[in-house]
Structure formats: structure tokens, C-alpha cells
Amino acid sequence: MSEPLSCTEPTAYDRITSDGGKAGVKFRLQLVVVNASGHEHVQEVARIERDEVSIETLGLTLAEGKLILKSIQEGMVQEQIQDALRRRRHCPECGKARHGKGHHDVTMRTLFGNIELKSPRPEHCRCQRHVEKTFSPIQAILPEHTSPEMLYLEVKWSSLLPYQVGCDLLHDVLPVNEKLSAVTMRNHLFAVPNGWSRNWARSGRA
């Protein structure tokens, strides 16, 4: 399981105070994870402080909003993956625990940032015959490593705007990975079936 997300130390993104004064309002944003047994696990997402209110300090800034979305996404995805892996630790046929054979890294691309996952590779149970000795639960659960919404916006904006403009727009408004490029968006557009991207863009959703 990943370390709890925390912004306890002030940064340029999560702790904003006016010059020469003590903050008048403090905000603590937390992600509360509740498991099947009702146990709660709290992950701190961010701390924000505000002094005198002005139009510039009213609510969240774009930078703060992007950082918070990225932190929440990281926490949610890691918890979902850990829950899915726990459900697959034992053989569904005989109930024996599966033995692990190491892991490899997997990157999930989402609108709210790339998520790095540890993908274990357990052995198949010997109570049943299998072609391969090991398997990847994450690969079985998530054969695609790009979220549908991420691909949707890449394809939509690439079909409506110049590639670089669409790429810059994604970077401006969402916490997408900094490595996302116009070339990647162009390749994804060409990879979809002929005519599918244009129909998708017109309809607004697949």
C-alpha cells in the first residue's frame, strides 16, 4: 500500500498565506477510506491557509485544485488496487494462498495524473492446470493502461484543435502527466477506428 498522502509541510501549492499576517482561515482536506468492515483510514490531502479575502484568494486557485485532484486520484486508485489484490490472494477453487514471484511496475494514465502501481505476479494454484505458471492480476483487471476519459479528451481535442494547442489545454486545466505531448495525442487519434474519433467528438461522449 502506498504511503498516506500528506501535505503537512508548507509548499507553494498547498499552503498560501498573505504577506505579513497570520492566516484567518485554515482548511484541511482529507480522503477518508472506509473498508468492507467499516474501518476508516484517513489520508491527508492538503492544508490551505487564507488571510484577508480578495478575488485572487477566493476559493481554490487552479494550481491548488490540480494538486488536490492529483492527490485524491492517487489515494483512490492505490486503495482500489490494493483491495482488488487482496481479493485475489487466495485460489478461488481451493482457498489456498498464492505464492508471489516478484512484481513489475505499471503506469496508469488518467486525467488527474499518472499513477505508478506495483503489479505483483503470483503463481497459479496447483489444484488446477494452467498454461502459464504465473499471472498478473492487475493486467487481468486493467488490460488498458489509459483511462477512457483521458483517451476521450485526447482524441476529441486532437480532432478539433491543432495537436499542440490541445496538448497545452490539457496541461493548463488538468493535472495530466508532464510528459504528455502533442505527438502522443496524435498517435492516439490515429490509433482509434476510422471515423470513430469524429463521431465521438460530435456526440460529446462515447
Image (cartoon, rainbow, N blue to C red):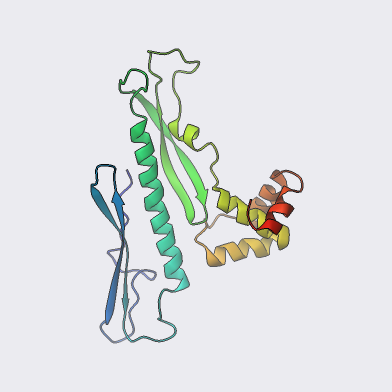
* Image mark count: 0
> Residue placed at 33% from the left, 85% from the top?
19
Q: Is residue 66 above or below residue 180?
A: below
Asked if 24 appears above or below 109 in the picture, the reply is below
**Which x, y percent locates residue 164?**
67, 62
Foreground pick, 80 / 114: 80
Q: Residue at x 66, y 53 (%)?
A: 155
Q: Position of residue 40 (x, y in %)?
A: 24, 50
How far from the left and from the top, in percent, is residue 119? 42, 36
Q: Quadrant of residue 31?
A: bottom left
* 44 relative to 184 in the view: left or right: left
Tell me the quadrant of the picture where the N terminus can be found.
Answer: top left
Q: Taking 84 as reference, is 113 left or right?
A: right
Q: Position of residue 20 (x, y in %)?
A: 29, 87
Left or right of 129 on screen, residue 194:
right
- Residue depicted at x 54% and y 48%: 147
Placement of 145 over or under 197, stated as above or below: above
Q: Is residue 24 above or below residue 99?
A: below
